[in-house]
Amino acid sequence: MSDYANTPNTALADGESVQASFAADRATYIRDHAWLAAAAMAAGMGLLWAMGNPHVWTGAVGGLAAVAFRAWFIASDELAVRWDLTDRRLLGPGTRAVRLAEIKAVNTLGSAVQIVTLSGDKHLLKYQKNRDATRTRILAAQAGRRDG
């Protein structure tokens, strides 16, 4: 079996149950890549202008093409990712599992929710439709966790 999977394949412990699932949202994915494309287009044009290139507009074309290709190429993987929240752990793609008691911080970064563990490991739940609701749900589960 491959070490990589888009969904959790960690077995649940006795009495453990999934409370919520967090999947990537297609509209959020597209919106985030549109913003990335705009930034890449501006950067490309700015660099060409700074170098004195008379065809500054080609920076916009290159930036858009690069981000569009990236978005198309990784979409099937990124949009298939799912995280499951149980009453004890946050289960990520493959065998990633973080006990709720081990979570030190739950941050937001753009449309993503970042989980930071006590040992310093970091995990991203990317392209969340409502990142604040995802963060709140994880914190609520952590506050009511069972460490059994």
Image (cartoon, rainbow, N blue to C red):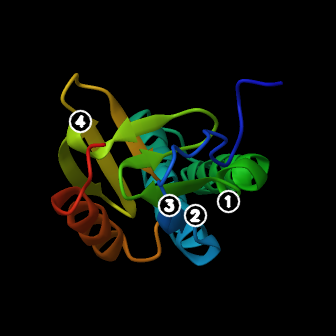
Report the residue at 44% width, 58% height from top.
85
Q: Residue 17 carries which label?
A: 3
Residues at marks 4 and 2, CA–CA distance in whole angstroms: 24 Å
Residue occupied by mark 2 = 24
Mark 4 falls on what kind of element? Answer: helix
Horizontal side of 143 relative to 138 (left or right) equals left
Task: Tell which circle, 4 or 2, labels the residue nearer the N-terminal end.
Answer: 2
Give the percent coordinates (x, y) of residue 127: 50, 62
Residue occupied by mark 1 = 79
Asked if residue 46 shows in the view, the reply is: no
Give the percent coordinates (x, y) of residue 74: 72, 47
Mark 2 falls on what kind of element? Answer: loop
Q: Nearer the viewer, mark 4 or mark 2?
A: 4
Given residues 108 and 65, the one toward you in this image is 108
Mark 1 falls on what kind of element? Answer: loop
Residues at marks 2 and 1, CA–CA distance in whole angstroms: 5 Å
Contact between marks 2 and 1 (CB within 8 A): the answer is yes
Horizontal side of 70 relative to 148 (left or right) equals right
Report the residue at 22% width, 53% height from top.
107
Horizontal side of 27 relative to 137 (left or right) equals right
